[in-house]
Image (tube, grey):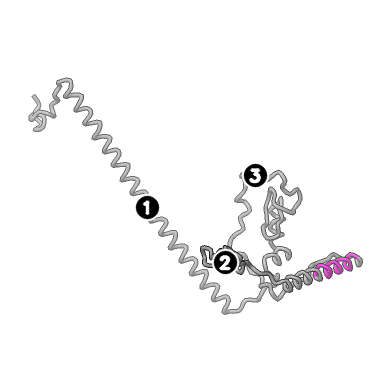
Amino acid sequence: MADKSKKPTTYDTASSDTSFRKTWDREQYAQKAADEDARARNEAHNRYEAKRTGKKYHAPIDYSSLEATTSRIQRLDVAARVGKTTIVPANAAVGRRGRGAGFYCPDCDLTFKDNVQFVEHLNSKQHLIATGQSGEVVRATVVDVRTRLRWLAHRRRVQEEEDRQVSQLDLAARWKNRQEQDDREREERRRKRNEKRRKGGAHGIKSEEDTWEGRLGIIA
């Protein structure tokens, strides 16, 4: 009698073969758990020491991984939502933490009811660190200024070219709409003229324009 357990499957492998499953490195995950536990213990100790001395605890920051602070490229438009209705969930945050009605910062998960507070938050150290900026400004050199001026001139030329293309597209679209409107009016006039002629022929009335005298301009 044949052994059914050794019968190959669709992929020509034995049914008991589980080598395709993912294997886990127990030592690696044990070391990861130990490091996380040590970090939590160290943070708890630092919090206790800060509280005992009457200071506020701040998590250590690796400033070497942060970039220098730069100016915003886009203009901050805080008046874009004036007069608009925002739907917020029933469990929206009452304080600043979480997303609610107002100016929301997704990087810090904070909501501000006032645009002045929102702008101050965007310039604060908390927001800069959350966005990967150190808060330090690098002094620009002459080469940096020249590069910036070239980039601004290039951006202005690109913007002017885009505006010119948009105006050309609008002109072509308006011209096309005008032609379609003229065609519709011409077709309507032709339809009314044909309908008037059909009605005149049905009643046996022949206008002067249909006779050869009328076509030649001779009035009887």
The residue under the point 37% across, 52% down is 171
Q: Residue 205, how many percent across, how many down?
A: 15, 21
Closer to the camera: disc 3 or disc 1?
A: 3
Which disc number belongs to residue 171?
Answer: 1
Q: Residue 54, how many percent across, how many down?
A: 90, 65
The N terminus, quarter of image = bottom right
Q: Is residue 220 magenta?
A: no
Q: Residue 153, how many percent across, how many down?
A: 49, 69
Say which of 135 and 213 sits in front: 135
The residue under the point 29% across, 38% down is 185
Compute the Cα span from label 3 to label 1.
Answer: 39 Å
The residue under the point 31% across, 45% down is 179
2 or 1: tag closer to the N-terminus = 2
126 w.r.t. 197: above or below: below
The C terminus, quarter of image = top left
Q: Is residue 45 magenta?
A: yes
Closer to the camera: disc 3 or disc 2?
A: 2
26 w.r.t. 111: above or below: below
Compute the Cα span from label 2 to label 1.
Answer: 76 Å
